[in-house]
Image (cartoon, rainbow, N blue to C red):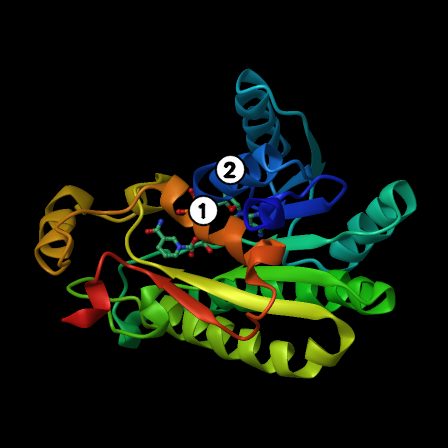
């Protein structure tokens, strides 16, 4: 009665930025639960390497090149998947960038626009397009990748643009959840602590930063992509049938202190 709610057989799931990191772990979790998974990544080579990783684990995934900052491209991909499968049941808005560490007073126009474009605008374009299709079918589940940075201000690295983008993702999640609850579409988010992925490697002096972050975390460690994917799987599945507009913190207690 309970475990069958995690069965995603017959569902089609799109994971943006699914070629590596948290997105790839989400693709893995959704495939293991039986969904037809589509890895949508800006770089076809990264998407293909994610597909190969899944294949090694015994799962087939489709790949598609999609830049979430391009609404026309998002629509093209959605139309083609709807033509192919009849609809998309699950959308994981995972694509995101950080570009730390730049002090607010020194952030260039291009830098601010780029982070907001991927992390916020991209989430909205995908929600609008795939969510619109879900509304027509009267069902669907969207899971957005937020962050502890939507709740707290990270230290010591400066990243005002990232923090603002993730706080906006959280409130966009609640807004869409309220608008679409009557249409059978659930919209939730997961807010992870620091997760050991390539994204962190883009931060200068990350090994030193990690010591600060671990000290600030009650559990005394970073998270792993799989620990976020299991929350995404829950939110995407019927086990979360009463959840919409929830921002689920998966932070090892980081925000308790
Ligand atoms: P990674 O950098 O490891 O992976 C991000 C993926 O998104 C990459 O495959 C990247 O492609 C892809 N991507 C980037 N820009 C676009 C775009 N415009 N369109 C489509 N795909 C794109 O990141 P993580 O796995 O660490 O992070 C995933 C999500 O989780 C992000 O939203 C991030 O903000 C969030 N998060 C991460 C945390 C962490 O500590 N790692 C903590 C909290 C939240 P490419 O490789 O080609 O650039």
- Disc 2 vs disc 1: Cβ atoms closer than 8 Å? no
Instruction: Please indicate, yes or no, whether residue 121 appears anywhere in the rendered image.
Output: no
Tell which residue pokes out farthest to the top in this image: 56
Neighbours of disc 1 within 10 Å: few (<14), some (14-19), many (20+) = some
Q: Quadrant of the C terminus?
A: bottom left
Instruction: Please indicate, yes or no, whether residue 46 appears anywhere in the rendered image.
Output: yes
| Cα–Cα gap, marks 2 and 1 | 12 Å
Tell which residue pokes out farthest to the front in this image: 1
Q: Residue placed at 62% from the left, 24% from the top?
A: 59
Residue 105 left/right relative to 117: left
Q: Residue placed at 42% from the left, 75% from the top?
A: 167
Neighbours of disc 2 within 10 Å: few (<14), some (14-19), many (20+) = many
Judged from the image, the secondary structure of the residue bearing numbered disc 2 is helix
Q: Which mark is residue 24?
A: 2
Task: Report which quarter residue 48 is drawn in.
Answer: top right
Q: Which mark is residue 230?
A: 1
Residue 95 left/right relative to 131: left
Q: Position of residue 37 (x, y in %)?
A: 67, 38
> Mark 2 CB in 8 Å range of ligand 1?
yes
Task: Report which quarter residue 173 is drawn in.
Answer: bottom right
**Nearer the camera: disc 2 or disc 1:** 1
């Amino acid at each position: 009665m309970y475990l069958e709610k995690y069965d995603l057989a017959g569902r089609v799931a799109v994971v943006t930025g699914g070629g590596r990191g948290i997105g790839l772990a989400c693709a893995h979790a959704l495939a293991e639960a039986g969904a037809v998974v589509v890895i949508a990544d800006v770089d076809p080579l990264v998407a293909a390497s994610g597909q190969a990783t899944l294949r090694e684990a015994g799962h087939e995934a489709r790949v598609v090149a999609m830049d979430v900052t391009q609404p026309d491209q998002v629509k093209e991909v959605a139309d083609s998947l709807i033509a192919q499968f009849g609809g998309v049941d699950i959308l994981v808005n995972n694509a995101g960038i950080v570009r730390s560490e730049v002090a607010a007073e020194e952030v260039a126009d291009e830098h601010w626009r780029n982070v907001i474009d991927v992390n916020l605008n991209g989430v909205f374009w995908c929600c609008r397009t795939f969510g619109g299709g879900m509304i027509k079918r009267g069902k669907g589940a969207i899971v957005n990748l937020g962050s502890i940075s939507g709740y707290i201000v990270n230290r010591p690295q400066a990243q005002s643009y990232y923090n603002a983008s993730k706080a906006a993702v959280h409130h966009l999640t609640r807004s869409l959840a309220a608008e679409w609850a009557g249409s059978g579409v659930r919209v939730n988010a997961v807010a992870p602590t620091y997760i050991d992925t390539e994204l962190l490697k883009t931060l200068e002096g990350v090994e030193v930063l990690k010591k600060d972050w671990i000290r600030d975390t009650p559990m005394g460690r970073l998270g792993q992509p799989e620990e976020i994917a299991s929350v995404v799987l829950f939110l995407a599945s019927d086990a979360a049938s009463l959840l919409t507009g929830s921002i689920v913190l998966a932070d090892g207690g980081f925000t308790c202190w």
